[in-house]
Image (cartoon, rainbow, N blue to C red):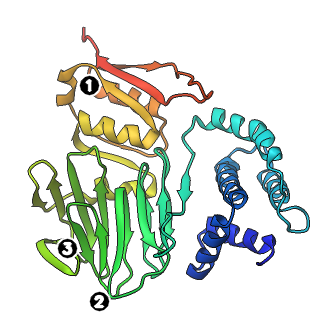
Amino acid sequence: MKPNVYYEGLLVRFLDGTIQPEELSQLEEWKNSSDDNTRLFEAYVQTSLYAERLVKMRSIDINKDREQVKRKLFGPDGNKVRSLSWFYRASAVFVIPLFITTALLFYQKINFSGDSATNMLSAETAYGVRTQIELSDGSRVWLNSGSKLTYPAKFNGNVRCVKLTGEGYFHVKSDKNHPFYVDLGPYSVKATGTSFNISNYYDDKKVSTMLEKGKVTLVERSGEQEKELCRVTEGELAAYDKEKQHVSICNGMDNSKYLAWVEGKLVFRNDPMEEVISRLGRWFNVDIEVKDVELKGYFYTATFINETIDQVLDLLTYSAPIKYTVLPREKGPDDTFSKRKIIITKRTVR
């Protein structure tokens, strides 16, 4: 067994996104070898992610805090600290102010999947968080908030397969001999080397695939057999209606609406209120409820970059007769607070 300072290095490379597939397997084996290691892994990942989000806050020395955390986790000589009681005490000082200052928007969860036989991994983003992953073949995936990607630590065999729930932007490394599949449940998106965006949230009525470059094929797979549903070319949007189980193709679409989120932009293009509040809720990690049915018939066109949810809602009130109320958070039995809830109602025009 290698010394823990070695695994500390693996943890750092894992968080930086530079870890190699074989190192990822070693880190997973170490993590799963004991409950202590699992807790240490989760503590280090969460604390490091919190620290990264606090870099923008100039009032604290992040590097010093992270070094203190590392020393506590592994000790000055690289050996694991056996008692975790320090961590729970530190959490009360470090994490609680963080929750207050970030309003719960920056918590990110990344975890290993439990199938050690096939070495499958999963990356999951909480609502209000976005992240990027590099796969073993060099392909890159950007995950939007509330999304999950399941993928192998290393691609083997004749195909490259991943599974997506939520939204992801894919930049697939070209390899015509090893097609790339994104499993969406009712069908898969097949590519060899291209870039595209997929939205596959469980509570949406449709699954959409927007092709930026190249071409992709929508297929139904059963073992090694596959049935082609349709082909999508550049600039086209393939929308699968879950209820009707039908795929429609639209061309001449505005790519910015579907791809801008990768750059941190929220874009609406004549979108109905129902879609607007759904995307705002995921983007800002809030619950939004529209009380008046009539308001669901309103459509919006806007682009938001650095605005807060309050600023976004204020701007929306300028283009429609609406008003909003922010309800106080409710404290649960475990001392955690519920998500922020916003009620939208019709405003009387005089």
Residue behind mark 1: 320
What amino acid type should be assigned to the residue bearing mark 1? Ala
Vertical placement of residue 266 versus 136, above or below: above
What amino acid type should be assigned to the residue bearing mark 3? Ser
Say what secondary structure mark 2 lies in: loop
Identify the mark at residue 176; answer none if there is no mark.
2
Whether residue 207 can be seen here: yes
Q: Nearer the viewer, residue 34 or 162?
A: 34
Please state the horizontal and vertical placement of residue 260, each as a whole percent of the image: 37, 56
Q: CA distance from mark 1 to mark 2?
A: 50 Å
Identify the mark at residue 222; answer none if there is no mark.
3
Circle 2: is it few (<14), some (14-19), or many (20+) Cα within 10 Å? Answer: few
- Between tags 3 and 2, which lies in front? 3
Q: Which of the 4 image quadrants contains residue 309?
A: top left
- Between tags 3 and 1, which lies in front? 3
Say what secondary structure mark 3 lies in: strand
Looking at the image, tell me whether mark 3 or mark 2 is earlier in sequence order. Answer: 2
Say what secondary structure mark 1 lies in: loop
What residue sits 83% from the left and 45% below the top? 86
Vertical placement of residue 20 versus 238, above or below: below
Looking at the image, tell me whether mark 1 or mark 2 is earlier in sequence order. Answer: 2
Please state the horizontal and vertical placement of residue 333, each as a whole percent of the image: 58, 24
Circle 3: is it few (<14), some (14-19), or many (20+) Cα within 10 Å? Answer: few
Q: Residue at the bottom extreme? A: 177
Circle 1: is it few (<14), some (14-19), or many (20+) Cα within 10 Å? Answer: some
Q: CA distance from mark 3 to mark 1?
A: 48 Å
Q: CA distance from mark 3 to mark 2?
A: 21 Å
Vertical placement of residue 224 versus 240, above or below: below
Whether residue 218 can be seen here: no
Query: Left or right: 302 with respect to 225?
Result: right
